[in-house]
Amino acid sequence: MGGHIKRSVTALPVHGETVLVRADLDVPIVHGSVDPSFLRPAIHTIRYLLAHSNKVVVVGHVSRPDGIDESFSTRLIAKTLANLLQVPVHYVGAVTGSKAMMAIRRAPKRSVVLLENLRFDAREEKNDAEFAAELAKTTGAKYFVQDDRRSVQHTFASTVAITNYIPAVAGFNVIDVWDGPGVKSLLDA
């Protein structure tokens, strides 16, 4: 496949919306700490969306845990992400369900909500449509922004199936990536 992703985050007519962002959170966590340089690529797209008064819901995965493993929780990333963005990041210890839904609804505009590690749910790597539908419903997002350059090479619920439930565009980190199922779903959207 070749060509350009014609639908980018800059083409979104958003202001004051809830936007779901698939960010690259697969960073090394050493003694509960994250080197900020590993999260810098995610910052540009999130800042752009915040500047347009949007509520940004961030999802991603950390490593390859076998079920729920707190040493791979996105909770460990929240503080570093907040420091880089210079805004509070509201961590939620769930990906779908009422706990996550209520936290997102309560979050104000121009805020960031970080959901738990997607891979804590085995359905993520199976590109499970039900999981993607739950994620869409939980977040209430008007748009989905694929901003994880590495995950577009894979067929996951949060890279492919999600595009069946929320209009999808490419973030700044994947605009120039042409191959992979996660980009094909953006081109076909």
Image: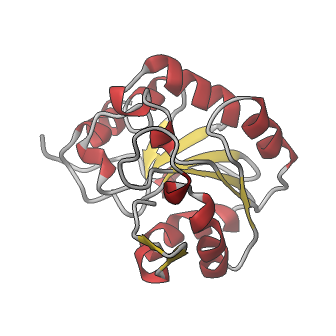
The residue at the point 60 percent across, 80 percent down is 84
Quadrant of the frame with the N terminus = top left
- State whether residue 39 is above or below residue 109: below
Q: Quadrant of residue 147?
A: bottom left
Residue at the top extreme, as displayed: 130
What colouring style does the render use? Answer: secondary structure
Position of residue 109 measured from the top left corner of the image (x, y, whole percent): 81, 56
108 or 49: nearer the viewer: 108
Position of residue 32 measured from the top left corner of the image (x, y, whole percent): 55, 72
In the drawing, does residue 79 fall left or right of residue 27? Answer: right
The reply to whether residue 163 is visible in this rendering is no
The residue at the point 50 percent across, 76 percent down is 31
The residue at the point 23 percent across, 45 percent down is 153
In the drawing, does residue 25 fall left or right of residue 73? Answer: left
Residue at the left extreme, as displayed: 1
Position of residue 159 measured from the top left corner of the image (x, y, whole percent): 39, 38
- State whether residue 121 is above or below residue 5: above
- State whether residue 20 is above or below residue 42: above
The residue at the point 51 percent across, 27 percent down is 132
50 or 157: nearer the viewer: 157
| Count of numbered tags | 0
Quadrant of the frame with the C terminus = top left
Position of residue 172 measured from the top left corner of the image (x, y, whole percent): 41, 63
The reply to whether residue 68 is visible in this rendering is yes
In the drawing, does residue 84 fall left or right of residue 120? Answer: right
